[in-house]
Amino acid sequence: LLRKRVEKRERQIDGLAPTFIKKPSIQQENDGKRLIFECQIQADPKPQIRWSHNSKVIDNTPRHKFKVQNDGKLYCATLEVDNVSFEDSGKYKVTAKNELGESSATISLNFDSEEVPVPADGFKPAFTERPVTRQSDDGKNIIFECRCIGDPKPTYTWYHEKNEITMSGRFASEVEEDQNHCYLIRFTIKDVKQLDRGVYSVLAKNKHGDSSAIINLNFDSSSKLVNPEGKPPRFPQKPTISQKGEVLSMECILEALPVADITWYHGQDTITDGDRFKILRKAISNDTYLLTLQISQPTANDGGIYRCHAFNPFGESNAHITLNFKANENDRGFAPSFVEKPKIIPNSKGTLITMKCRCRSKPKPTVKWMRKKQEVKTSNKVSLEVKTMDDDTYELTLNIKDPSAEDGGSYSCVISNEFGESSATLNLNIESEQESTKNAPIFVEKPHIVSQDNGKLVRMECKVKTDIKPDITWTREGKLLQESSKLKITMTTEKDVYHISLVLKDPQTEDSGTYKCNIKNILGELNANLILNIEIVPVIKEKPKLVTNIKKRTASIECAVASRFKPECVWMKETTVIKETHRHLIKIEETREGEFSVKLNITELSEADFGAYKLVAKNDKGQATSQVIEIKDIVFEKPPPTKPIIETKLKDVEIDEGGNLVLAVGLVHPDRHFKVYWMKNKTLLKTSETVIQEFSGRMAKLTVKNCKAEDAGFYKVSISNEQQSDESEAKVTIKTIKKDEKKKVTKKEEKVEEKKEEKVEIKVEEKKVEEKKVEAKKVEIKVEEKKAEVKVEEKKAEVKVEAKKV
């Protein structure tokens, strides 16, 4: 008996399972304080929409609002997030579900902490991306990486099967802050063993809460490491077609880890990058890509079925796009095209297999089925049928009775009429019982590249396990490789393990690219993709360009560097290396493949920045130095003079004869360039032993020592610049004391307390009328609160005391 492996026909239900017509996008409103996530879904009946953030379902709250609007079977779903903060960054997922199926799409939101407010008291940790698992080149070590946000900085604890891991010996963990509140966490397992397999988790925790991420580590039955956390290619959304001007674009969203090898087909023909066809790939996230095929000046001959084939070590997938030019659908007719994906349908007993296609054509097409480049004819085993379903729509079938392993392989349905031709491919896999017990090819080691003899020899290696010797084919960028004096292909075997290698001698830059090793036998097929990058010494072809903004006092120097990889760049002024500061910012951006723009931005530009600048770019192969560019001969605009404004005005004052007069004013805007003039009764005062003038830029002060009766009058201060001034005036009164009542009081110690009575020790010198000298005596005096008058200056205190001797 033969065991057949075929596709089972799915039960047909009226309606549409949810499909994303427009991928999720993000819009900003209200100066970035509000974000709107929007997507379009086709479904029938109406789908249920669910949004989640970092794997947590989002509920309807004052900050989160959901909307769903429909136009027939097309639904527009939106999520609004108000008062956006840094903790809103991360991975968002929208899921649409009805009774016919379920579909989901994701989008990542990332921003710097400077773009949005960070909660003043911080926020709990959150993992913003799915953890990634990498294996060292020698296969001995495993590295887990994940990204987390949190404020304050979280602590991290790793677990294996819920048991906490102690960081010592074979286990090591490190945390790197790659921007404010964002952290890259790495966990390394050295000399990986079978006992290391299982579930790992990392717990991030701070005072606001905690969050965790899960990673699975698996091995195959031969104790060899399986490339962890791999992901077979998958097209989660329906491909789209758009046209701008004379360029038509077909776009597909692909999910794959590691990156998949991409091949585009038009019918059975492989499409190569050229003048009319451009093949593009753009990374959206670490495992999601936007694939684009562009056709310049498309014609009716470009119509038909297009196929995007994606392959990586974990599997393969295809996306089909039908390109029809409706403008050609006139009364005479139009070229045939397939309107549905071809199907292979077995009956319940496995005694009949039906291959079915549906197409549109006017007039009715000629149908030809092909297998192994030979036309399939009607026989006792095979029957062919063309059935008219509707106006210009036809169903094409090929039936195989009692199928066997010999009937397996690739079949093509070719349809044509006078307006054109189209084809569809169907792969029929049938295994015999004997064959099914044998092992198809599997990788037992991760394919890798080894550089030897200081880069003069490159070896690409794969190790494959299979029960039947495989056929090996090597290609580079889609072109078949043959052995030569420079290139050697070998395959050795040890039991059921095959060691496959490609050796490249004296590699050059033009040898860079994607190498693909196809490993195939009757049991199965594998493909290994290896990317070879050959670095060269950086090249600087042009002199750096200088752009200055005198008004803003900024300068920007830009230089283009040709290098396959991002070079290490250093800007120099004369012979001094420029380091990044708040005034100097260095920015390196890849403008296109193999070319980088290196900028030096200078703010608060001044004459101190004048001089000769140059760029030094280097990598492992060497370095290059740019021509010199000078910043010089810039005349800066002088800022308008600051208007003097007196904030603290002068006040009238009365002092005793013999005391010190102190007058002071304060300014709103300090400026040492202001000129200060003091006048008494409109007469300009000059500095002397008894007249002291001080100016700090913020405060102007006048001190007159040992005042006499003639020092009384009106004092004025005038503060000015070249164009403007401000003034303040006050009256000064000198109180004269009679000779027999004069006393000199020298303050020995002053202690003021908030009490009704105070004790003051003073030294009193008395001078008798009769020319006799009396020694100073210490007198302890009780002073009642109401009788003591105390005047305190900024630095000195004068105390006037009416006292009684005790």
Image (cartoon, helix red, strand yellow):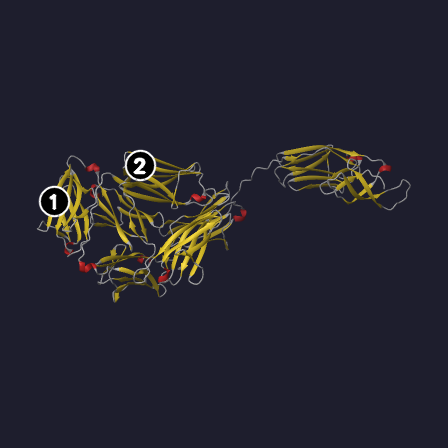
Q: Is residue 544 in sight in this rendering? A: no
Q: Classify 664 as above or below 517.
A: above
Where residue 750 appears, x then y in whole percent? Answer: 76, 44
Secondary structure category for the residue under label 2: strand
Residue 387 vs residue 792: left or right? left
In the rendered structure, which amino acid carries the disc numbered 2? Tyr
Residue at 65% across, 33% down: 726
**Structural crowding at the residue carrying mark 1, measured as other residues with C-alpha within 10 Å and reported as few (<14), some (14–19) or many (≥20):** few
User: Which of the marked residues, 1 or 2, is nearer the chain's N terminus?
Assistant: 2
Mark 1–mark 2 distance (CA, rounded to whole Å): 39 Å
Where residue 775 appears, x then y in whole percent? Answer: 87, 46
* The C terminus, quarter of image: top right
Give the total of numbered labels: 2
In front of the other: 183 or 282: 183
Q: Classify 759 as above or below 487.
A: above
In front of the other: 507 or 687: 507
The image quarter in which residue 39 lies: top left
Residue 685 vs residue 31: left or right? right
- Mark 2 highlights which residue? 75
In front of the other: 82 or 371: 82
